[in-house]
Amino acid sequence: MATAELHAAEFHELDGWSEDDHEAAFAAFRRSALRAATEAPKTRALGIDGTALAAITRKALALPERPGATLARAFFEENFVPHRVGADGFFTGYYEPEVEARLEREPDFTVPLLRPPPELVEVDEADPPANLPAGMRFARRTETGVEPFFDRGEIERGALDGRGLEIAWLADPVDAFFIHIQGAARLRLADGSLLRVTYAAKSGHDYTPVGRVLLERGVLQRGNVSMQTIRAALAADPEAARSAMWTNRSYIFFREAPVEDAALGPIAAAKVPLSTGRSLAVDRTLHTFHVPVWIETSLPEAEGGGPFHRLLIAQDTGSAIIGPARGDIFFGSGDEAGRVAGRMAAKGRFVVFVPRVSS
């Protein structure tokens, strides 16, 4: 398992710390506090103590929801010590797509988003069955035990048809594929209402980046791989697109979720709603959920560029987010967020906030 050393730093060494919107960061942290205060997060491999973090979240709940910039900054400085991760940082972006959908299959809406079938079960990480590939976290329960579940190609060829698992129907298989990658979506229904779907489970097979497959096949050229170029390539040749998408054997199942606050994103892996520009997906095997993370990176040139130095909260994870200094920034919902997220790929600095030990 990849780990990294943590090197203590001072707040004044964080480039842009004094200019950040600390109250916005506090709002995201307080959403984490509503869960972590009563259910301490698991301490992961980097050693950020979940119990100590939970104690700090209880302090956050004792403050006003909007404490002001000065008090919010003081809260972070009094309760945490920044530690640079001893590895090169790399940051991408993700978002919540918004697409047209129907609750019943129609001639132009034939691509389903599925809820998990009852035989799909999560594997015990501490004691996985010997017959499953290493690292497989979901499998199919049978009368004699468990076995690997169907992969993407098998499901899209009909392995689960007729089971009544459909939540909604989309018009475009590429839209569905990117909803699987993002793990959530807002669906615009015929009556104008919004239905949110969010991650519930997955097939258990490894995630394969389709951009890498298109590179290997010569469809895309190195240096020109983004969500936008990938989508264009898949749309240009539906048969080749199907073949490329099936190389990603990981298939995502969803559950319905209300859109209670249009300003917030879906509830993610840490069981709290995501905050635009303040939530970060991290490697869940290394990082303790709900910990604040200071990042120093830059936005895509095509979207105006410029530094992106701010405090985010580790509230999500992802199959492709691997390593101690790997982060995926949540940019919000809809097409504009998707334009930024799809082009985001930049190096930077990853600084995790370690709970301060009282003397």
Image (cartoon, rainbow, N blue to C red):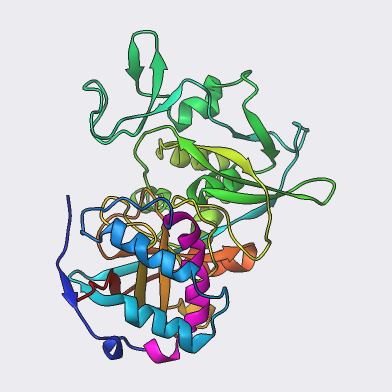
Q: Is residue 287 visible?
A: no
Task: Name, please, the residue furthest toward the top.
Answer: 143
Q: Residue placed at 85% from the left, 47% from the top?
A: 191
Q: Could you tell whether 92 is left or right of 65 in the image?
A: left
Q: Residue placed at 33% from the left, 63% from the top?
A: 53
Compared to residue 56, the image places residue 156 above or below, namely: above
The quadrant where residue 351 appears: bottom left
For the C terminus, the image quarter is bottom left
Compared to residue 285, the image places residue 202 above or below, namely: above
Instruction: Tell me where the magenta segment starts and ends, as one range.
Output: 16-36
The residue lying toward the viewer, choosing from 161 and 309, is: 309
| Residue 34 belongs to the span the image colors magenta | yes
Q: Residue placed at 21% from the left, 59% from the top?
A: 46
Q: Could you tell whether 96 is left or right of 190 in the image?
A: left
Q: Could you tell whether 64 is left or right of 215 in the image?
A: right
Residue 135 horizontal/vertical position (percent): 26, 36
Magenta span: chief secondary structure: helix
Residue 3 horizontal/vertical position (percent): 17, 58
| Residue 52 belongs to the span the image colors magenta | no
Residue 22 horizontal/vertical position (percent): 47, 82
